[in-house]
Image (cartoon, rainbow, N blue to C red):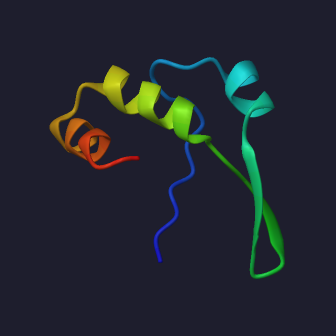
């Protein structure tokens, strides 16, 4: 399993993104995950081919 920890991302503001985060638990550790709406905005804003390909496969 690979987990990416980012401190900044394109297209979204931290405060709004954090308010709408998904809180989950993995192996007893609570983690914050970007919600789908903000993930899609970020992938579009990044403009990288890989992210644009990912965007096409998100629900």
Q: Percent from the top left, x then y, of residue 13?
A: 63, 17
> What residue sits 49% from the left and 36% below the top?
39
Give the total number of marks visible in the rendering: 0
> What residue sits 41% from the left and 47% below the top?
59
Asked whether, in this view, residue 38 is left or right of residue 18, the answer is left
Q: Percent from the top left, x then y, of residue 33?
A: 65, 49
Kindly give the residue lying farthest to the front in the view shown.
Answer: 59
> What residue sits 45% from the left and 22% below the top?
10
> What residue sits 54% from the left and 32% below the top?
37
Q: Percent from the top left, x then y, of residue 9?
A: 50, 29
Kindly give the residue lying farthest to the left in the view shown.
Answer: 49
Asked whether, in this view, residue 46 is left or right of residue 28, the answer is left
Answer above or below: position of 53 versus 14.
below
Q: Percent from the top left, x then y, of residue 3?
A: 52, 64
The picture quadrant where one finds residue 8 is top right
Asked whether, in this view, residue 49 is left or right of residue 16, the answer is left
Q: Which residue is at the front of the view, 36 or 15? A: 36
Answer above or below: position of 27 versus 16.
below
The picture quadrant where one finds residue 45 is top left
Q: Which residue is at the front of the view, 4 or 50? A: 50
Answer above or below: position of 29 versus 45.
below
């Amino acid at each position: 399993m690979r987990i990416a920890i980012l401190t900044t991302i394109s297209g979204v503001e931290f405060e709004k993104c954090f308010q709408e985060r998904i809180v989950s638990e993995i192996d007893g550790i609570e983690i914050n995950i970007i919600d789908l709406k903000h993930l899609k905005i970020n992938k579009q804003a990044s403009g990288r081919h890989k992210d644009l390909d990912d965007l096409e496969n998100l629900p």
